[in-house]
Image: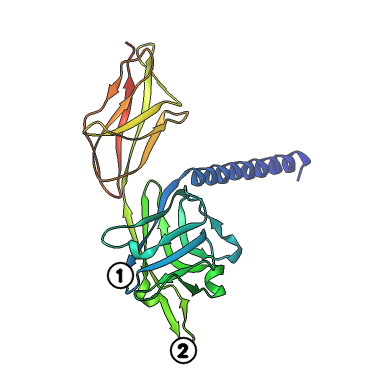
Amino acid sequence: MSMKYIKSVLGTVVTIMVLLLMVNCDSDNSNKNETARVQLKLVDEPGDYLEVNIEIIDIQYKSSDEEESWESFTPEVGYPINVDITELIAGNSLLLTDEVLPVGVLKQVRLVLSDNNTLKIEGEEGLIPLDTPSAQQSGLKLNLDEELEAGFVYSFILDWNVQKSIVKAGNSGKYILKPVIKVNAEVSSGSISGKVVEIIEETIETPIGNQIVEVYTTDDTLVKDTLTDENGDFVLQGLEAGNYILKISKETYISYESSEVTVEVGNIESVGTITLELE
């Protein structure tokens, strides 16, 4: 076997390996660019207490079985989150967090509580300390096992049963906090996708990158906006079911306004290619 042949074979193998590596990298980057929106909402089932004041000092999630893979949500109000959960009834809820996460399986979330939790009971003066076991302070784990798909909004309703969550410890007079929380997932929203181009030399379509695309309700209320990528493509995610209007404005071009676009939960509605025309 000649040295020239061996070099040729080795060169071919190296080329294939490089191509496979590039494909894998592209795939990884594509997955990183695909996201879903996750909301955690806290509600309460009515109980016999005047107040149940809870302090949450961290909310975490993980997407793998590895125990060290926990990551923290970053709520807009910051930590700690203080709430009287007895107020979260009759349609009231507390939005704990609303964040965009990479697609994939969301396995668990956990609420990390401080020891600064109190109780108010009718007929008794002042606030009663709620003894919070160290297990709750290290994190109350809630199993989700929800597959997050790109473009959707996932609202997880954390239904806190306050009556079952508070236990009186014998004759000591102490009250112990042992949260009982049921989780329900609501997958809502859909998306609108499309592409924005301009015509060059009468026949050549050229993508317009970094272009703002706005979506409005039919009564002309701005819902959200996004930017096109370098290929002119865009996706408006997290839209509630309903009818919308797309608007695009670009200097020296005629403003674009679409006809009504109907969004359905779980679907990505494509509006195809939008061509902007010079004034």
Residue pushed farthest bottom? 171
Locate the C terminus and report the quarter of the image it occupies: top left
Within 10 Å of the Cα at label 2, are there few (<14), some (14-19), or many (20+) other Cα atoms? few
* Residue beneath the point at 41% across and 58% down: 147
Q: CA distance from mark 1 to mark 2?
A: 25 Å
* Residue beneath the point at 22% across and 29% down: 259
Residue pushed farthest right? 3
| Number of numbered markers | 2
Mark 1 or mark 2, earlier in chain = 1
Residue at label 2?
Answer: 171
User: Is residue 107 shown to the viewer in this render?
Assistant: yes
- Report x, y in % for residue 9: 69, 43
For the residue pair 112 and 29, the one nearer the viewer reads as: 112
For the residue pair 41 and 63, the one nearer the viewer reads as: 41
Residue at label 1?
Answer: 46
Q: Which corner quadrant of the image does residue 145 belong to?
A: bottom left
Q: Left or right? Give the position of 94 relative to 75.
A: left
At label 2, which amino acid type do we have? Asn
Q: Left or right? Give the position of 107 relative to 236.
A: right
At label 1, which amino acid type do we have? Pro
